[in-house]
C-alpha cells in the first residue's frame, strides 16, 4: 500500500419483513497516517435504520364508556459521524494538534395508516377519530479542538487546549385529527396540531495544564480553565 498508511473498512446490512420491509445498514472507515513529523487519523461512520412503534390500547372509563386506540408509526433514522485529528511534531519539545468531529442525525416518524381512536358508550360507537402523524427530530453536533504541548524536559511540560462545541437540536411535529360519527359523518372541524421547536447551543473553553516532577517521588500539577456557553431556544406551538 502506501508507507505510513493503514486503515480498515466495514459494511453491514440487515432486513426484516413485517407489515412493511424494514432494513438497516451501517459501516465504518478508519484511516491512519504516520510520518516522522505527523500523526493523522480519520474516521467515518454512517448508519441508516428503519423500524416501527405500535400502540394498541383499550380503556374502561366507567359509566359504560370505553375508548380504544390503534397507532402504527414507521420510523427511519439516518446518521453520520466523522472525526479527523492531527498531531504535528515540530521538534522534540513542541507539539501542535487539532481534532474536528461532527455527529449528524435525523429521525422521522409517520403513520403507516391513520391512527384511530374510538369512543363507545354502552357498546355503541359515538365518536371515531383519525390522526395522520408526521414527526421529525434532528440532532447535529460539531466539535473542534486546538492544542499545543511544550515539553521543557522529561516530566516538565505545559499543555494548552481551546475547544468549541456547537449543537443544533430540532423537533417538528404535525398531527391532523378528523372526527366522525358511526355513520362516517364529520361531527367536528378537523384539528391540526403543530410543534416547531429548535435549540442552539454554543460552548467555548480554554484551559492550560502544567505539570513538573520534583525529584523522584513528587509532582506539581496546576491548571486554569475558562468556559462560556450560550443557548438559544425557539418554540412554535399551534
Image (spheres, helix red, strand yellow):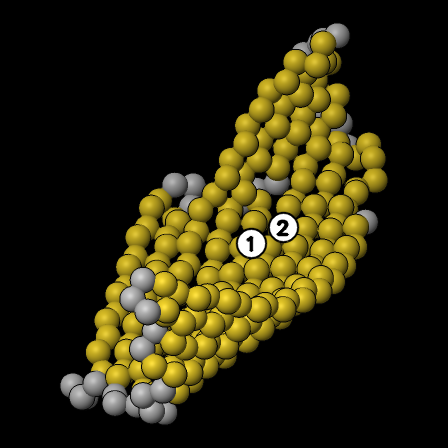
Q: Secondary structure at mark 1?
A: strand
Q: Is residue 186 above or below residue 228?
A: above
**Tag of residue 108:** 1
Q: Is residue 50 above or below residue 30?
A: above
- Structural distance between the alpha carbons of marks 2 and 1: 7 Å
Q: Quadrant of the N terminus?
A: bottom left
Q: Is residue 158 above or below residue 106?
A: below
**Tag of residue 13:** none
Q: Position of residue 111 (x, y in %)?
A: 57, 45
- Lower position in the chain sequence, tag 2 or tag 1: 1
Q: Is residue 103 visible?
A: yes
Residue 197 occupies which quadrant of the picture? bottom right
Q: Secondary structure at mark 2?
A: strand
Residue 35 occupies which quadrant of the picture? bottom left
Q: Is residue 159 above or below residue 89?
A: above
Q: Position of residue 6 (x, y in %)?
A: 21, 78
Q: Position of residue 224 (x, y in %)?
A: 57, 69
Residue at x-position 55% and y-position 75%? 162
Front-most of residues 76 and 10: 10
Residue at x-position 46% and y-position 62%? 79
Residue that badge 2 annotates: 134
Q: Are marks 2 and 1 in contact (CB under 8 Å)?
A: yes
Residue at x-position 30% and y-position 57%? 13
Residue at x-position 58% and y-position 31%? 70
Q: Position of residue 217 (x, y in %)?
A: 31, 62
Q: Crowding at label 2, few (<14), some or many (≥20) Cα neighbours within 10 Å?
A: some
76 relative position to 68: left or right: left
Amino acid at each position: 500500500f502506501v508507507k505510513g498508511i493503514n486503515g480498515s473498512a466495514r459494511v453491514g446490512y440487515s432486513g426484516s419483513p413485517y407489515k412493511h420491509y424494514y432494513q438497516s445498514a451501517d459501516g465504518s472507515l478508519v484511516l491512519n497516517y504516520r510520518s516522522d513529523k505527523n500523526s493523522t487519523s480519520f474516521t467515518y461512520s454512517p448508519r441508516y435504520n428503519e423500524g416501527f412503534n405500535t400502540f394498541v390500547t383499550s380503556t374502561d372509563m366507567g359509566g359504560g364508556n370505553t375508548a380504544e386506540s390503534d397507532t402504527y408509526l414507521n420510523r427511519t433514522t439516518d446518521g453520520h459521524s466523522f472525526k479527523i485529528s492531527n498531531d504535528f511534531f515540530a521538534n522534540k519539545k513542541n507539539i501542535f494538534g487539532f481534532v474536528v468531529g461532527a455527529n449528524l442525525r435525523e429521525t422521522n416518524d409517520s403513520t403507516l395508516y391513520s391512527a384511530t381512536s374510538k369512543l363507545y358508550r354502552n357498546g355503541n360507537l359515538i365518536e371515531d377519530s383519525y390522526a395522520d402523524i408526521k414527526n421529525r427530530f434532528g440532532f447535529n453536533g460539531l466539535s473542534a479542538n486546538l492544542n499545543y504541548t511544550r515539553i521543557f524536559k522529561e516530566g516538565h511540560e505545559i499543555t494548552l487546549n481551546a475547544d468549541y462545541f456547537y449543537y443544533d437540536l430540532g423537533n417538528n411535529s404535525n398531527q391532523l385529527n378528523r372526527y366522525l360519527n358511526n355513520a362516517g359523518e364529520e361531527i367536528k372541524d378537523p384539528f391540526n396540531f403543530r410543534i416547531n421547536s429548535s435549540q442552539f447551543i454554543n460552548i467555548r473553553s480554554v484551559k492550560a495544564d502544567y505539570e513538573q516532577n520534583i525529584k523522584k517521588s513528587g509532582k506539581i500539577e496546576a491548571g486554569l480553565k475558562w468556559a462560556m456557553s450560550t443557548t438559544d431556544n425557539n418554540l412554535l406551538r399551534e
